[in-house]
Amino acid sequence: KHCKNQVHSAYFATSTSTAIMMMHAAATTQTIAKGNMDGSVHTLPTQNDPSSHSVECPDNTSSHGGQHEALKKVSIVDCGSAQEMIPNGQPFHIENEYFSGAVMLMIRTPDVDNSSEPKPLGEVPATISNYFKNYKRRFEFQFQIRFKKVPNGPLFLGCEVESTIKISRFTRGLVGLLLGMIRRINSGFHYSFGSRVLTDEQIESGDYEKTHLSFPVEASMDRVVVTKPGEDPPTLGQELHESPESVRRRRRMGFGSVEWNTEDTFTMCLWNAYMDWIKWKTMNVPGCRPFPLSNVTGYQPVYLCVYELTNVTTQEYRKQKPGHIQKSLSHYARIEFAHEDVTKGGIAPRFHSKHLQNDSCVDTDSELGSEHSICSEHCTNLKNCA
């Protein structure tokens, strides 16, 4: 019962932090792909366009001006356009063949919990800083979209890395057991450790799974607000309201609990009290001390993505539960998270000139006989990974 309540309190928090915590505890416990997105950016219909209701259309010119200095440690990039998305700023506009819309990234800064920290000077950053004082959330990501075509297959919200995480068979088995428990509680949950060795043919054809964890979009979002044509959608950057009955229904039903269509505007949000992007650490998990995300992912950036599984319908997926093979995925959005002091590779335009002082692989805090280190393809001292 406790496990079920924890999962229901933050579905996708499990994939980005709690499930990572499980991997860490179990251990104590080829070029960055840009998805299938069309990176073009166009102008959304405005409120004066009688043919459609509006989705806010920012100009993607936001900068770190007026922000808390700590936010510069984090790079968040829209993989479709290779443009950096500045958190705690104006909403970021995304337009591709699947949807048009905006994303607002809000991250808790040190001044929220420490009065001696300098306050952000910008109006929007200061407003977001005050917003977080009412919650324990480390971040909240808000999305406001209008589909251009109705998805035929199930939609997933996933967290993935490019390279396979290197863990021992014992650790892999234990983590698999824990993740299997989550899947029994949430039938739509899917995970894969990826493949350690891929042939050129598999890479070229997309016949493989990446290391990832994913949930149905309908169940993973903390709030989903549907706005009918002619009505005003919620303003991004403010609290989104959904009835408790609607939230319980989505989490119970998963697939099919939201009727995706091309007329309505869908405003959704995802929050988490356990992942601190600025510190690149998992925090506040009961019974587990804070630990660096790099203990699990190595130097790799982390990717948050929304994708459709195109080779099955929702009804077929419930019965067959096929793997999430790359060639069967259509990426609606893919966002890269990188850190100035930790990650290497990826897009992260501001960090390309940065180099870690220690290029060796990241050691784990293993007490259960896992392999010497967890590493990625970006490690330069490969002899330590042998």
Image (cartoon, helix red, strand yellow):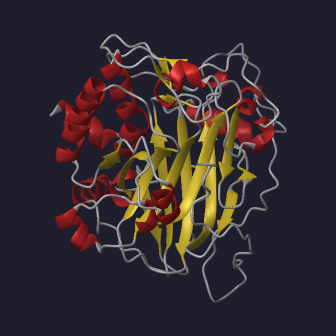
Residue visible at 45% across and 31% down in the picture: 273
Q: Residue 213: x, y in percent?
A: 38, 45
On screen, 51 above or below 159? below
Q: Residue 349: x, y in percent?
A: 78, 44
Q: Farthest residue toward the bottom?
A: 51
Q: Can residue 73 be seen in this view?
A: yes
**Number of numbered discs on residues:** 0
Quadrant in which residue 5 is drawn: top left
For the residue pair 219 and 307, the one nearer the viewer reads as: 307
Q: Residue 164: x, y in percent?
A: 45, 39
Quadrant occupied by the N terminus: top left
| In the image: residue 237, left or right of residue 14 | right
Q: Is residue 237 visible?
A: no
| In the image: residue 153, left or right of residue 68 | left
For the residue pair 353 and 25, the one nearer the viewer reads as: 353
Residue visible at 32% across and 15% down in the picture: 287
Residue visible at 17% across and 46% down in the picture: 184
On screen, 288 above or below 50? above
For the residue pair 221 and 119, the one nearer the viewer reads as: 221
| In the image: residue 232, left or right of residue 119 | left
On screen, 288 above or below 193? above
Q: Residue 285: x, y in percent?
A: 38, 22
On screen, 199 above or below 16? below
Quadrant in which residue 300 is drawn: top right
Residue visible at 28% across and 71% down in the picture: 314
